[in-house]
Image: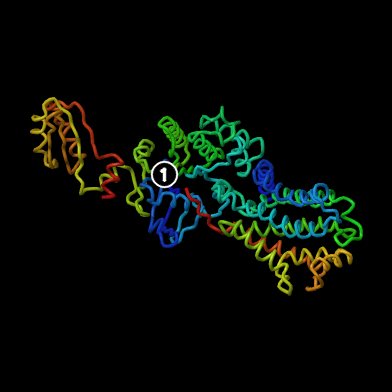
Amino acid sequence: MLRATIILFTFHLWRLCLSHRLLVCLGVSALPVAAAYFIKTISSYTGPPPAVELAWFLIVQFVVPVLALILGSAVVAEEVEDRTITYLFTRPIPRMTILLGRWLASLVILCSLLLACVLLTVQFLGESAAGDHEHALPAGSVAALCQVAVAGGIVYSALFAACGALVRRPIILGLGYTFAVEAFLGNLPGKNQALTIQYYLRSYLCGQSDAILARMQQLTDGPNVAMATANDALATLVYVLVTALVVGCWTISRRQYVLTS
Amino acid sequence: MTPIIEAENLGRWYGQVAGLNEVSLSIAGGITGLVGINGAGKSTLIKLLVGEIRPSRGSIRVLGEEPFANRAFFRKIGFCPQQDALYDDMTGLALITFLMRLSGYPRAQARSGAEQALQRVAMTEAMHRRIGGYSKGMRQRVKIAQAIAPQPQLLICDEPLNGLDSMGRRSILELLSELGSSGVHVLVSSHVLHEVENLTENIVLLHRGRVLAQGTVPEVRNLLTRFPRRVEITAGHARRCAEVIMPLEHVLSVGIVPETGLLKIETRDIDRFYRDLTAIVAAGELEIGSLEAVDAGLEAVFDYLVD
Protein backbone atom coordinates (compact mmCIF):
# COMPACT_ATOMS: atom_id res chain seq x y z
CA MET A 1 0.00 0.00 0.00
CA LEU A 2 2.82 2.40 0.88
CA ARG A 3 4.60 1.64 -2.39
CA ALA A 4 1.49 2.32 -4.47
CA THR A 5 0.84 5.52 -2.50
CA ILE A 6 4.37 6.74 -3.18
CA ILE A 7 4.13 5.91 -6.90
CA LEU A 8 0.81 7.73 -7.18
CA PHE A 9 2.15 10.64 -5.12
CA THR A 10 5.16 11.08 -7.40
CA PHE A 11 3.06 10.68 -10.52
CA HIS A 12 0.44 13.22 -9.45
CA LEU A 13 2.98 15.72 -8.13
CA TRP A 14 4.84 15.66 -11.41
CA ARG A 15 1.64 16.11 -13.41
CA LEU A 16 0.39 18.86 -11.11
CA CYS A 17 3.60 20.80 -11.62
CA LEU A 18 2.90 20.87 -15.37
CA SER A 19 -0.84 21.45 -15.17
CA HIS A 20 -3.08 24.43 -15.89
CA ARG A 21 -4.52 23.87 -12.42
CA LEU A 22 -1.21 25.05 -10.95
CA LEU A 23 -1.46 28.29 -12.92
CA VAL A 24 -4.93 28.93 -11.49
CA CYS A 25 -3.62 28.20 -8.00
CA LEU A 26 -0.70 30.55 -8.55
CA GLY A 27 -3.17 33.23 -9.61
CA VAL A 28 -5.31 32.78 -6.50
CA SER A 29 -2.37 32.70 -4.11
CA ALA A 30 -0.90 35.80 -5.75
CA LEU A 31 -3.99 37.87 -4.88
CA PRO A 32 -2.96 38.89 -1.33
CA VAL A 33 0.62 39.38 -2.48
CA ALA A 34 -0.54 41.62 -5.30
CA ALA A 35 -2.88 43.48 -2.95
CA ALA A 36 -0.05 44.05 -0.49
CA TYR A 37 2.24 45.25 -3.25
CA PHE A 38 -0.46 47.54 -4.63
CA ILE A 39 -1.23 49.09 -1.24
CA LYS A 40 2.40 49.59 -0.36
CA THR A 41 3.89 50.84 -3.57
CA ILE A 42 1.29 51.87 -6.13
CA SER A 43 -1.84 53.22 -4.45
CA SER A 44 -2.14 56.68 -2.95
CA TYR A 45 -3.12 55.17 0.40
CA THR A 46 -0.74 56.65 2.95
CA GLY A 47 -1.94 55.09 6.22
CA PRO A 48 -0.52 51.92 7.74
CA PRO A 49 -1.26 48.93 5.51
CA PRO A 50 -4.15 46.70 6.63
CA ALA A 51 -1.94 43.72 7.39
CA VAL A 52 -4.34 41.92 9.71
CA GLU A 53 -7.24 42.34 7.29
CA LEU A 54 -5.16 41.02 4.40
CA ALA A 55 -3.84 38.14 6.44
CA TRP A 56 -7.12 37.12 8.00
CA PHE A 57 -9.84 37.92 5.48
CA LEU A 58 -7.96 37.50 2.24
CA ILE A 59 -5.56 34.69 3.08
CA VAL A 60 -7.23 32.57 5.76
CA GLN A 61 -10.84 33.12 4.77
CA PHE A 62 -10.43 33.19 1.00
CA VAL A 63 -7.12 31.89 -0.37
CA VAL A 64 -6.84 28.90 1.97
CA PRO A 65 -10.28 27.35 1.27
CA VAL A 66 -10.31 28.28 -2.42
CA LEU A 67 -6.84 26.83 -3.09
CA ALA A 68 -7.77 23.74 -1.09
CA LEU A 69 -10.95 23.46 -3.15
CA ILE A 70 -9.15 23.74 -6.48
CA LEU A 71 -6.55 21.14 -5.55
CA GLY A 72 -8.54 18.94 -3.17
CA SER A 73 -11.65 18.50 -5.27
CA ALA A 74 -9.52 17.25 -8.17
CA VAL A 75 -7.89 14.46 -6.17
CA VAL A 76 -10.43 11.84 -7.22
CA ALA A 77 -12.91 13.78 -9.34
CA GLU A 78 -10.35 14.71 -11.99
CA GLU A 79 -9.58 11.05 -12.72
CA VAL A 80 -13.30 10.25 -12.81
CA GLU A 81 -14.10 13.18 -15.07
CA ASP A 82 -11.20 12.38 -17.41
CA ARG A 83 -12.30 8.71 -17.32
CA THR A 84 -8.72 7.64 -16.65
CA ILE A 85 -9.53 6.17 -13.25
CA THR A 86 -10.22 2.85 -14.98
CA TYR A 87 -6.48 2.38 -15.50
CA LEU A 88 -5.88 2.81 -11.77
CA PHE A 89 -8.87 0.75 -10.63
CA THR A 90 -7.76 -2.23 -12.70
CA ARG A 91 -4.32 -2.41 -11.06
CA PRO A 92 -3.57 -4.60 -8.06
CA ILE A 93 -3.50 -1.73 -5.59
CA PRO A 94 -5.89 -0.75 -2.80
CA ARG A 95 -8.24 1.86 -4.20
CA MET A 96 -7.67 4.15 -1.23
CA THR A 97 -4.04 4.65 -2.31
CA ILE A 98 -5.36 6.63 -5.27
CA LEU A 99 -6.91 9.14 -2.90
CA LEU A 100 -4.02 9.15 -0.45
CA GLY A 101 -1.21 9.41 -3.01
CA ARG A 102 -2.88 12.15 -5.01
CA TRP A 103 -4.01 14.05 -1.91
CA LEU A 104 -0.47 14.06 -0.49
CA ALA A 105 0.87 15.37 -3.80
CA SER A 106 -1.75 18.14 -3.75
CA LEU A 107 -0.69 18.98 -0.20
CA VAL A 108 2.90 19.61 -1.28
CA ILE A 109 1.75 22.18 -3.82
CA LEU A 110 -0.92 23.62 -1.54
CA CYS A 111 1.30 24.10 1.49
CA SER A 112 4.13 25.55 -0.62
CA LEU A 113 1.77 28.07 -2.18
CA LEU A 114 0.16 29.01 1.12
CA LEU A 115 3.47 29.52 2.87
CA ALA A 116 4.78 31.57 -0.04
CA CYS A 117 1.57 33.58 -0.02
CA VAL A 118 1.76 34.45 3.68
CA LEU A 119 5.46 35.20 3.67
CA LEU A 120 5.43 37.28 0.49
CA THR A 121 2.39 39.25 1.61
CA VAL A 122 4.08 40.15 4.89
CA GLN A 123 7.33 40.82 3.04
CA PHE A 124 5.66 43.28 0.68
CA LEU A 125 3.94 45.07 3.53
CA GLY A 126 7.39 45.54 5.00
CA GLU A 127 8.06 47.03 8.36
CA SER A 128 4.71 48.80 8.44
CA ALA A 129 3.04 45.38 8.90
CA ALA A 130 4.48 45.50 12.40
CA GLY A 131 4.30 48.36 14.90
CA ASP A 132 1.53 49.34 17.23
CA HIS A 133 -1.06 50.84 14.86
CA GLU A 134 -4.48 49.21 14.70
CA HIS A 135 -3.82 47.35 11.43
CA ALA A 136 -0.43 45.96 12.38
CA LEU A 137 0.30 42.27 12.82
CA PRO A 138 1.01 41.47 16.47
CA ALA A 139 4.37 39.96 17.31
CA GLY A 140 4.65 36.26 16.49
CA SER A 141 1.68 36.31 14.21
CA VAL A 142 3.59 35.52 11.00
CA ALA A 143 4.57 32.08 12.29
CA ALA A 144 1.06 31.58 13.64
CA LEU A 145 -0.46 32.62 10.32
CA CYS A 146 1.76 30.16 8.49
CA GLN A 147 0.61 27.38 10.82
CA VAL A 148 -3.04 28.33 10.42
CA ALA A 149 -2.78 28.56 6.65
CA VAL A 150 -1.13 25.14 6.41
CA ALA A 151 -3.51 23.55 8.94
CA GLY A 152 -6.50 25.05 7.14
CA GLY A 153 -5.17 23.92 3.77
CA ILE A 154 -4.67 20.36 5.00
CA VAL A 155 -8.13 20.08 6.57
CA TYR A 156 -10.01 21.78 3.74
CA SER A 157 -8.24 19.79 1.04
CA ALA A 158 -9.01 16.49 2.81
CA LEU A 159 -12.63 17.58 3.07
CA PHE A 160 -12.83 18.47 -0.61
CA ALA A 161 -10.96 15.32 -1.64
CA ALA A 162 -13.56 13.25 0.23
CA CYS A 163 -16.24 15.34 -1.43
CA GLY A 164 -14.68 14.53 -4.81
CA ALA A 165 -14.87 10.83 -4.03
CA LEU A 166 -18.52 11.18 -3.08
CA VAL A 167 -20.03 13.39 -5.77
CA ARG A 168 -19.47 13.95 -9.44
CA ARG A 169 -19.17 17.77 -9.35
CA PRO A 170 -17.34 18.51 -6.10
CA ILE A 171 -16.30 21.98 -7.18
CA ILE A 172 -19.92 23.21 -7.13
CA LEU A 173 -20.61 21.69 -3.73
CA GLY A 174 -17.26 22.97 -2.48
CA LEU A 175 -17.91 26.52 -3.66
CA GLY A 176 -21.29 26.48 -1.94
CA TYR A 177 -19.71 25.20 1.25
CA THR A 178 -16.81 27.66 1.13
CA PHE A 179 -18.93 30.74 0.68
CA ALA A 180 -22.26 29.82 2.29
CA VAL A 181 -20.95 27.95 5.31
CA GLU A 182 -17.35 28.93 5.91
CA ALA A 183 -17.45 32.56 4.83
CA PHE A 184 -21.02 33.44 5.84
CA LEU A 185 -21.76 31.25 8.86
CA GLY A 186 -18.18 31.59 10.04
CA ASN A 187 -18.61 35.35 10.38
CA LEU A 188 -22.12 35.44 11.79
CA PRO A 189 -22.32 36.30 15.46
CA GLY A 190 -23.41 33.41 17.63
CA LYS A 191 -22.41 29.88 18.50
CA ASN A 192 -23.07 28.60 14.99
CA GLN A 193 -19.56 29.68 14.13
CA ALA A 194 -18.38 26.59 15.93
CA LEU A 195 -19.77 24.54 13.03
CA THR A 196 -17.14 25.93 10.70
CA ILE A 197 -13.48 25.14 10.22
CA GLN A 198 -12.80 28.88 10.18
CA TYR A 199 -13.83 29.09 13.84
CA TYR A 200 -11.22 26.53 14.84
CA LEU A 201 -8.56 28.15 12.67
CA ARG A 202 -9.34 31.47 14.34
CA SER A 203 -9.33 29.83 17.76
CA TYR A 204 -5.95 28.26 17.05
CA LEU A 205 -4.58 31.57 15.84
CA CYS A 206 -5.94 33.45 18.86
CA GLY A 207 -4.54 30.82 21.17
CA GLN A 208 -0.99 31.61 20.08
CA SER A 209 -0.75 34.85 22.06
CA ASP A 210 -2.87 37.38 23.92
CA ALA A 211 -1.83 40.05 21.47
CA ILE A 212 -3.23 38.08 18.54
CA LEU A 213 -6.43 37.37 20.49
CA ALA A 214 -6.87 41.07 21.27
CA ARG A 215 -6.27 42.05 17.63
CA MET A 216 -8.70 39.41 16.33
CA GLN A 217 -11.37 40.55 18.76
CA GLN A 218 -10.80 44.10 17.58
CA LEU A 219 -11.09 42.91 14.01
CA THR A 220 -14.33 41.00 14.57
CA ASP A 221 -15.76 43.89 16.56
CA GLY A 222 -15.65 42.52 20.05
CA PRO A 223 -15.66 39.16 21.77
CA ASN A 224 -18.95 37.96 20.28
CA VAL A 225 -18.05 34.29 20.54
CA ALA A 226 -15.88 32.51 23.06
CA MET A 227 -12.87 31.00 21.31
CA ALA A 228 -11.86 27.38 21.81
CA THR A 229 -8.43 26.80 23.30
CA ALA A 230 -5.60 26.26 20.85
CA ASN A 231 -5.34 22.60 21.83
CA ASP A 232 -9.07 22.01 21.47
CA ALA A 233 -9.07 23.78 18.13
CA LEU A 234 -6.16 21.67 16.91
CA ALA A 235 -7.82 18.48 18.16
CA THR A 236 -11.03 19.38 16.34
CA LEU A 237 -9.14 20.12 13.14
CA VAL A 238 -7.34 16.77 13.40
CA TYR A 239 -10.68 15.06 14.03
CA VAL A 240 -12.21 16.67 10.92
CA LEU A 241 -9.12 15.74 8.90
CA VAL A 242 -9.16 12.10 9.96
CA THR A 243 -12.92 11.82 9.46
CA ALA A 244 -12.67 13.33 5.98
CA LEU A 245 -9.86 10.96 5.01
CA VAL A 246 -11.66 7.91 6.40
CA VAL A 247 -14.86 8.85 4.56
CA GLY A 248 -12.92 9.53 1.37
CA CYS A 249 -10.97 6.26 1.56
CA TRP A 250 -14.07 4.25 2.40
CA THR A 251 -16.01 5.85 -0.44
CA ILE A 252 -13.39 5.28 -3.11
CA SER A 253 -12.96 1.69 -1.94
CA ARG A 254 -16.67 0.90 -2.15
CA ARG A 255 -18.19 3.24 -4.70
CA GLN A 256 -18.95 2.22 -8.27
CA TYR A 257 -17.85 4.90 -10.66
CA VAL A 258 -19.87 4.53 -13.83
CA LEU A 259 -17.82 6.11 -16.57
CA THR A 260 -19.42 7.09 -19.84
CA SER A 261 -17.85 5.88 -23.05
CA MET B 1 -11.89 -26.93 -19.99
CA THR B 2 -12.54 -24.88 -16.84
CA PRO B 3 -14.55 -21.80 -17.67
CA ILE B 4 -12.71 -18.52 -17.25
CA ILE B 5 -15.91 -16.53 -16.92
CA GLU B 6 -19.03 -17.68 -15.16
CA ALA B 7 -22.12 -15.57 -14.68
CA GLU B 8 -25.37 -16.62 -13.14
CA ASN B 9 -28.61 -14.64 -13.37
CA LEU B 10 -26.50 -11.55 -13.74
CA GLY B 11 -28.36 -8.27 -13.77
CA ARG B 12 -27.28 -4.67 -13.67
CA TRP B 13 -29.66 -1.74 -13.47
CA TYR B 14 -28.91 1.94 -13.91
CA GLY B 15 -31.85 3.39 -12.01
CA GLN B 16 -34.90 2.22 -13.95
CA VAL B 17 -32.89 1.14 -16.98
CA ALA B 18 -31.68 -2.43 -17.29
CA GLY B 19 -28.14 -2.54 -18.65
CA LEU B 20 -28.06 -6.30 -18.32
CA ASN B 21 -30.80 -8.71 -17.34
CA GLU B 22 -30.82 -12.38 -16.34
CA VAL B 23 -27.53 -13.16 -18.01
CA SER B 24 -26.16 -16.61 -17.38
CA LEU B 25 -23.12 -17.68 -19.29
CA SER B 26 -19.97 -19.68 -19.09
CA ILE B 27 -17.00 -18.83 -21.27
CA ALA B 28 -14.13 -21.23 -21.80
CA GLY B 29 -10.61 -20.06 -22.61
CA GLY B 30 -9.25 -18.95 -25.96
CA ILE B 31 -10.53 -16.01 -27.92
CA THR B 32 -14.17 -15.08 -27.44
CA GLY B 33 -16.11 -12.35 -29.18
CA LEU B 34 -18.78 -10.44 -27.32
CA VAL B 35 -21.01 -9.06 -30.02
CA GLY B 36 -24.16 -7.03 -30.26
CA ILE B 37 -25.38 -3.72 -31.55
CA ASN B 38 -24.76 -0.51 -29.61
CA GLY B 39 -26.74 -0.57 -26.38
CA ALA B 40 -26.87 -4.36 -26.27
CA GLY B 41 -25.17 -4.46 -22.88
CA LYS B 42 -21.63 -5.35 -23.96
CA SER B 43 -19.96 -2.52 -22.08
CA THR B 44 -22.04 -3.15 -18.98
CA LEU B 45 -21.00 -6.79 -19.03
CA ILE B 46 -17.38 -5.78 -19.48
CA LYS B 47 -17.59 -3.26 -16.62
CA LEU B 48 -18.86 -6.10 -14.45
CA LEU B 49 -16.11 -8.41 -15.70
CA VAL B 50 -13.33 -5.96 -14.82
CA GLY B 51 -14.85 -5.01 -11.48
CA GLU B 52 -15.65 -1.45 -12.38
CA ILE B 53 -19.20 -1.97 -11.15
CA ARG B 54 -21.00 -4.60 -9.07
CA PRO B 55 -23.97 -6.62 -10.24
CA SER B 56 -27.43 -5.48 -9.09
CA ARG B 57 -28.31 -9.16 -8.88
CA GLY B 58 -26.78 -12.54 -9.61
CA SER B 59 -23.12 -13.39 -9.48
CA ILE B 60 -20.05 -13.23 -11.68
CA ARG B 61 -16.69 -14.93 -11.37
CA VAL B 62 -13.74 -14.34 -13.64
CA LEU B 63 -10.72 -16.64 -13.40
CA GLY B 64 -12.31 -17.98 -10.24
CA GLU B 65 -12.47 -14.57 -8.55
CA GLU B 66 -15.11 -11.97 -7.87
CA PRO B 67 -13.83 -8.93 -9.77
CA PHE B 68 -14.96 -5.85 -7.83
CA ALA B 69 -11.99 -4.17 -6.07
CA ASN B 70 -10.18 -7.53 -5.94
CA ARG B 71 -6.42 -6.98 -6.02
CA ALA B 72 -5.59 -10.65 -6.60
CA PHE B 73 -7.87 -10.61 -9.63
CA PHE B 74 -6.25 -7.51 -11.13
CA ARG B 75 -2.90 -9.31 -11.19
CA LYS B 76 -4.40 -11.72 -13.72
CA ILE B 77 -6.15 -9.44 -16.17
CA GLY B 78 -5.38 -6.71 -18.64
CA PHE B 79 -8.11 -4.32 -19.61
CA CYS B 80 -8.37 -2.08 -22.64
CA PRO B 81 -11.33 0.24 -22.01
CA GLN B 82 -13.59 1.63 -24.69
CA GLN B 83 -13.28 5.28 -23.76
CA ASP B 84 -10.67 7.28 -25.62
CA ALA B 85 -9.20 8.58 -22.39
CA LEU B 86 -5.49 8.63 -21.66
CA TYR B 87 -3.06 10.88 -19.80
CA ASP B 88 -2.41 13.18 -22.74
CA ASP B 89 0.44 15.07 -21.11
CA MET B 90 2.55 11.90 -20.76
CA THR B 91 4.54 9.96 -23.29
CA GLY B 92 3.37 6.47 -24.19
CA LEU B 93 6.42 4.96 -22.53
CA ALA B 94 6.05 6.98 -19.31
CA LEU B 95 2.37 6.06 -19.01
CA ILE B 96 2.89 2.34 -19.41
CA THR B 97 5.94 2.35 -17.16
CA PHE B 98 3.88 4.09 -14.48
CA LEU B 99 1.02 1.58 -14.83
CA MET B 100 3.48 -1.31 -14.78
CA ARG B 101 4.94 0.03 -11.55
CA LEU B 102 1.45 0.12 -10.10
CA SER B 103 1.13 -3.51 -11.16
CA GLY B 104 4.04 -4.26 -8.84
CA TYR B 105 7.04 -4.27 -11.18
CA PRO B 106 10.33 -2.66 -10.10
CA ARG B 107 11.33 0.44 -12.05
CA ALA B 108 13.75 -1.21 -14.52
CA GLN B 109 11.45 -4.15 -15.22
CA ALA B 110 8.49 -1.83 -15.59
CA ARG B 111 10.33 0.16 -18.22
CA SER B 112 11.53 -2.83 -20.19
CA GLY B 113 8.06 -4.40 -19.98
CA ALA B 114 6.54 -1.15 -21.25
CA GLU B 115 9.04 -1.00 -24.12
CA GLN B 116 8.28 -4.58 -25.11
CA ALA B 117 4.53 -3.98 -25.02
CA LEU B 118 4.88 -0.86 -27.13
CA GLN B 119 7.09 -2.71 -29.55
CA ARG B 120 4.44 -5.40 -29.82
CA VAL B 121 1.86 -2.85 -30.91
CA ALA B 122 4.34 -1.17 -33.28
CA MET B 123 4.65 1.99 -31.22
CA THR B 124 8.40 1.96 -30.57
CA GLU B 125 9.11 5.00 -32.73
CA ALA B 126 6.42 7.14 -31.13
CA MET B 127 6.84 6.00 -27.54
CA HIS B 128 8.79 9.09 -26.48
CA ARG B 129 6.17 11.47 -27.86
CA ARG B 130 3.30 12.94 -25.85
CA ILE B 131 0.08 10.94 -26.07
CA GLY B 132 -1.83 14.15 -26.77
CA GLY B 133 -0.16 14.24 -30.19
CA TYR B 134 -1.03 10.65 -31.11
CA SER B 135 -3.55 9.71 -33.79
CA LYS B 136 -6.65 7.76 -32.84
CA GLY B 137 -5.06 4.51 -33.97
CA MET B 138 -1.91 5.15 -31.95
CA ARG B 139 -3.96 5.93 -28.85
CA GLN B 140 -5.84 2.68 -29.33
CA ARG B 141 -2.57 0.81 -29.59
CA VAL B 142 -1.25 2.43 -26.42
CA LYS B 143 -4.43 1.35 -24.65
CA ILE B 144 -3.83 -2.21 -25.78
CA ALA B 145 -0.14 -2.01 -24.87
CA GLN B 146 -0.93 -0.98 -21.28
CA ALA B 147 -3.30 -3.95 -21.06
CA ILE B 148 -0.84 -6.54 -22.37
CA ALA B 149 2.29 -5.17 -20.70
CA PRO B 150 1.82 -6.97 -17.34
CA GLN B 151 1.40 -10.25 -19.28
CA PRO B 152 -2.13 -11.02 -18.11
CA GLN B 153 -3.84 -14.40 -18.21
CA LEU B 154 -6.96 -12.75 -19.56
CA LEU B 155 -7.11 -9.75 -21.83
CA ILE B 156 -10.43 -7.92 -21.99
CA CYS B 157 -10.86 -5.39 -24.79
CA ASP B 158 -13.95 -3.22 -25.07
CA GLU B 159 -14.44 -2.17 -28.71
CA PRO B 160 -10.71 -2.13 -29.49
CA LEU B 161 -11.33 -1.52 -33.18
CA ASN B 162 -13.34 1.68 -32.76
CA GLY B 163 -12.04 4.57 -34.77
CA LEU B 164 -9.31 2.61 -36.54
CA ASP B 165 -8.76 2.54 -40.27
CA SER B 166 -8.70 -0.81 -42.06
CA MET B 167 -4.94 -1.20 -41.70
CA GLY B 168 -5.14 -0.41 -38.01
CA ARG B 169 -7.98 -2.84 -37.52
CA ARG B 170 -6.09 -5.57 -39.26
CA SER B 171 -2.98 -5.07 -37.18
CA ILE B 172 -4.98 -5.10 -33.93
CA LEU B 173 -6.86 -8.24 -35.00
CA GLU B 174 -3.54 -9.90 -35.86
CA LEU B 175 -2.13 -8.93 -32.49
CA LEU B 176 -5.16 -10.28 -30.61
CA SER B 177 -5.02 -13.46 -32.65
CA GLU B 178 -1.32 -13.82 -31.87
CA LEU B 179 -1.99 -13.31 -28.16
CA GLY B 180 -4.70 -15.95 -28.32
CA SER B 181 -2.29 -18.38 -29.96
CA SER B 182 0.29 -17.71 -27.27
CA GLY B 183 -2.09 -18.90 -24.57
CA VAL B 184 -3.60 -15.63 -23.38
CA HIS B 185 -7.38 -15.78 -23.02
CA VAL B 186 -8.92 -12.90 -24.95
CA LEU B 187 -12.40 -11.43 -24.69
CA VAL B 188 -13.18 -8.82 -27.33
CA SER B 189 -16.37 -6.85 -27.62
CA SER B 190 -17.47 -5.28 -30.86
CA HIS B 191 -20.56 -4.15 -32.70
CA VAL B 192 -18.84 -4.85 -36.02
CA LEU B 193 -19.73 -8.50 -36.37
CA HIS B 194 -17.62 -9.50 -39.34
CA GLU B 195 -14.48 -8.27 -37.63
CA VAL B 196 -15.07 -10.48 -34.64
CA GLU B 197 -15.87 -13.31 -36.99
CA ASN B 198 -12.43 -12.90 -38.57
CA LEU B 199 -10.87 -13.23 -35.14
CA THR B 200 -12.77 -16.09 -33.56
CA GLU B 201 -15.64 -18.50 -33.99
CA ASN B 202 -16.54 -18.40 -30.30
CA ILE B 203 -19.11 -15.74 -29.73
CA VAL B 204 -21.55 -14.47 -27.17
CA LEU B 205 -24.40 -12.58 -28.80
CA LEU B 206 -26.00 -9.91 -26.65
CA HIS B 207 -29.16 -8.02 -27.43
CA ARG B 208 -31.14 -5.67 -25.21
CA GLY B 209 -29.23 -6.73 -22.14
CA ARG B 210 -29.73 -10.45 -22.62
CA VAL B 211 -27.67 -13.26 -24.10
CA LEU B 212 -29.26 -14.24 -27.39
CA ALA B 213 -26.90 -17.09 -28.15
CA GLN B 214 -23.52 -18.46 -27.28
CA GLY B 215 -21.19 -20.90 -29.00
CA THR B 216 -19.41 -21.12 -32.31
CA VAL B 217 -21.07 -19.42 -35.27
CA PRO B 218 -21.99 -22.73 -37.02
CA GLU B 219 -23.35 -24.13 -33.77
CA VAL B 220 -25.56 -21.11 -33.25
CA ARG B 221 -26.63 -21.17 -36.89
CA ASN B 222 -27.60 -24.81 -36.67
CA LEU B 223 -29.88 -24.02 -33.76
CA LEU B 224 -31.89 -21.67 -35.93
CA THR B 225 -33.91 -24.45 -37.56
CA ARG B 226 -36.86 -22.29 -38.53
CA PHE B 227 -34.64 -20.42 -40.98
CA PRO B 228 -33.64 -22.69 -43.92
CA ARG B 229 -29.97 -22.57 -44.86
CA ARG B 230 -29.26 -20.72 -48.06
CA VAL B 231 -26.59 -21.75 -50.52
CA GLU B 232 -25.61 -20.14 -53.82
CA ILE B 233 -24.01 -22.14 -56.57
CA THR B 234 -22.59 -21.21 -59.95
CA ALA B 235 -22.64 -24.06 -62.39
CA GLY B 236 -22.05 -24.47 -66.10
CA HIS B 237 -25.61 -25.61 -66.76
CA ALA B 238 -27.85 -23.98 -64.23
CA ARG B 239 -31.11 -25.61 -65.37
CA ARG B 240 -29.56 -29.10 -65.43
CA CYS B 241 -28.10 -28.44 -62.00
CA ALA B 242 -31.48 -27.37 -60.62
CA GLU B 243 -33.05 -30.55 -62.01
CA VAL B 244 -30.52 -32.69 -60.14
CA ILE B 245 -30.69 -30.82 -56.86
CA MET B 246 -34.42 -30.23 -56.59
CA PRO B 247 -35.41 -33.86 -55.96
CA LEU B 248 -33.15 -34.07 -52.91
CA GLU B 249 -35.38 -34.62 -49.91
CA HIS B 250 -33.96 -31.87 -47.70
CA VAL B 251 -33.94 -29.20 -50.43
CA LEU B 252 -36.84 -26.79 -49.96
CA SER B 253 -36.45 -24.57 -53.02
CA VAL B 254 -34.18 -23.87 -55.96
CA GLY B 255 -34.18 -20.59 -57.85
CA ILE B 256 -32.18 -19.44 -60.86
CA VAL B 257 -31.06 -15.87 -61.53
CA PRO B 258 -31.52 -15.73 -65.33
CA GLU B 259 -28.85 -13.07 -65.99
CA THR B 260 -26.03 -14.82 -64.19
CA GLY B 261 -27.19 -18.41 -64.00
CA LEU B 262 -26.71 -18.31 -60.25
CA LEU B 263 -28.59 -21.01 -58.36
CA LYS B 264 -30.20 -20.04 -55.04
CA ILE B 265 -30.95 -23.06 -52.93
CA GLU B 266 -32.71 -23.39 -49.60
CA THR B 267 -32.22 -26.54 -47.54
CA ARG B 268 -33.25 -27.58 -44.07
CA ASP B 269 -30.17 -29.79 -43.54
CA ILE B 270 -26.96 -28.20 -44.70
CA ASP B 271 -24.73 -31.14 -43.75
CA ARG B 272 -26.77 -33.62 -45.77
CA PHE B 273 -26.89 -31.15 -48.64
CA TYR B 274 -23.09 -30.91 -48.73
CA ARG B 275 -22.75 -34.69 -48.56
CA ASP B 276 -25.27 -35.27 -51.36
CA LEU B 277 -23.82 -32.53 -53.53
CA THR B 278 -20.32 -33.94 -53.13
CA ALA B 279 -21.59 -37.36 -54.21
CA ILE B 280 -23.36 -35.88 -57.23
CA VAL B 281 -20.30 -33.94 -58.33
CA ALA B 282 -18.06 -36.97 -57.75
CA ALA B 283 -20.37 -39.08 -59.91
CA GLY B 284 -19.83 -36.60 -62.72
CA GLU B 285 -23.46 -35.54 -62.91
CA LEU B 286 -22.67 -31.86 -62.32
CA GLU B 287 -19.89 -29.32 -62.68
CA ILE B 288 -19.82 -26.69 -59.98
CA GLY B 289 -18.01 -23.38 -60.43
CA SER B 290 -18.46 -21.99 -56.92
CA LEU B 291 -20.43 -22.64 -53.78
CA GLU B 292 -21.22 -20.21 -51.01
CA ALA B 293 -23.28 -20.56 -47.83
CA VAL B 294 -24.70 -17.06 -47.79
CA ASP B 295 -26.29 -16.99 -44.35
CA ALA B 296 -23.74 -18.94 -42.33
CA GLY B 297 -21.91 -15.82 -41.24
CA LEU B 298 -22.21 -14.06 -37.94
CA GLU B 299 -24.08 -11.14 -39.40
CA ALA B 300 -26.79 -13.33 -40.88
CA VAL B 301 -27.03 -15.33 -37.68
CA PHE B 302 -27.36 -12.15 -35.70
CA ASP B 303 -30.07 -10.81 -38.00
CA TYR B 304 -32.07 -14.03 -37.66
CA LEU B 305 -31.72 -13.96 -33.90
CA VAL B 306 -32.82 -10.37 -33.62
CA ASP B 307 -35.77 -11.06 -35.94
- Residue at left 59%, top 38%? B96
Element at label 1: strand
Percent across and percent down for residue A120 are 81, 48
Which residue is nearer to you in this view: A96 or A26? A26
Check disc 1 and give the amino acid type: Ser
Mark 1 Cα within 10 Å, few/some/many (few <14, many 20+)?
Answer: many
The chain carrying label 1 is B
Percent across and percent down for residue B274 are 20, 35
The image quadrant of residue A55 is bottom right
Which residue is nearer to you in this view: B307 or B286? B307
Percent across and percent down for residue B45 are 43, 52
Q: Is residue B46 left or right of residue A133?
A: left
- Residue at left 50%, top 35%? B141
Which residue is nearer to you in this view: B69 or A190? A190
**Image vertical order of residue B290 relative to residue A112, above or below:** above
Residue that numbered label 1 is attached to: B189
Q: Is residue A163 visible?
A: yes
Q: Is residue B52 left or right of residue A105?
A: left
